[in-house]
Image (cartoon, rainbow, N blue to C red):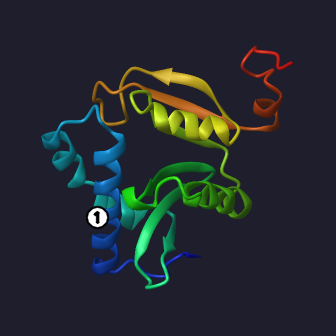
């Protein structure tokens, strides 16, 4: 596996990333109907083109199997192909993003408990909740922050023993 940051974003790459996105969403966003996924899918190529930092994990054949997008210090997107989940690729991408871009925050669908658990495992804690996503849809978003305070537990008001 190889982490790379494409200098350009040709249509072929966008199509490959869209395939990863769709597979990941169908596996993890169980609260979305097939129609809702198709509707959101229309906006994904544009998001992939404009996100300031696009980081792609490729397999040995140069095929993308995971990717993330970062804007400022916020993780805008992270998706791992279903057949690649559980192998540490998401964690590797996050570590790369923290080291290279200082990732501090991420927004997670509240109805995706696997994602919340993943980010909590990596030291993120919820600091805000909104009832709707950025498009105004009724999907609550948990805003999470990574910090040394998160590791100590005092930011959440829960002392660790």
In the drawing, does residue 46 fall left or right of residue 95?
A: left
Query: Which quadrant holds residue 15?
Result: bottom left
Compare residues 83 and 113 and report the one nearer the observer: 83
Q: Where is residue 151 in the image (x, y as percent from the top left)?
A: 79, 33
Under circle 1, the secondary element is helix
Residue occupying the far bottom of the picture: 61
Q: Is residue 24 above or below residue 149?
A: below
Task: Identify which residue is drawn at 49% across, 70% down.
Answer: 56
Residue 57 at x, y percent in the picture: 51, 70
Most extreme residue toward the right, as rendered? 161
Give the image location of residue 80, x and y in percent.
44, 57
| Residue appearing at x 78%, y 24% in the figure | 153
Dot 1 crowding, Cα within 10 Å, few <14, some 14–19, many 20+: some
Image quadrant holding the C terminus, namely top right
Provide residue 24's location: percent of width, then percent of height: 35, 52
Above or below, 59 against 73 in this view is below
| Side of 122 relative to 74 (left or right) | right
Check the image and name the residue furthest to the left. 35
Lateral position of residue 89 relative to residue 10, left or right: right
Q: Mark 1 points at which residue?
A: 19
Quadrant in the picture for the N terminus: bottom right
Q: Nearer the viewer, residue 114 or 133?
A: 114
Q: Along the horizontal axis of the image, is 79 left or right of 118?
A: left
Q: Is residue 111 above or below residue 7?
A: above
Report the residue at 28% width, 31% height from top: 31
Foreground of the two, 48 or 108: 108
Question: Which residue occupies 49% across, 83% down?
Answer: 60
């Amino acid at each position: 596996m190889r982490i790379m940051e494409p200098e350009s974003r040709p249509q072929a790459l966008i199509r490959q990333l869209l395939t990863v996105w769709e597979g990941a969403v169908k596996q993890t966003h169980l609260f979305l109907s097939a129609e809702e996924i198709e509707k959101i899918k229309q906006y994904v190529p544009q998001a992939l083109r404009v996100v300031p930092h696009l980081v792609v994990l490729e397999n040995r054949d140069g095929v993308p199997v995971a990717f993330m997008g970062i804007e400022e210090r916020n993780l805008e997107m992270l998706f791992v192909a279903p057949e690649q989940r559980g192998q540490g690729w998401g964690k590797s991408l996050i570590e790369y993003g923290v080291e290279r871009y200082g990732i501090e925050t991420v927004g997670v669908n509240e109805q995706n408990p696997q994602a919340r658990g993943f980010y909590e495992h990596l030291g993120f804690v919820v600091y805000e909740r909104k009832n709707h996503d950025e498009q105004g849809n009724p999907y609550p978003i948990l805003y999470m922050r990574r910090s040394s305070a998160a590791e100590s537990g005092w930011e959440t008001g829960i002392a660790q023993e």
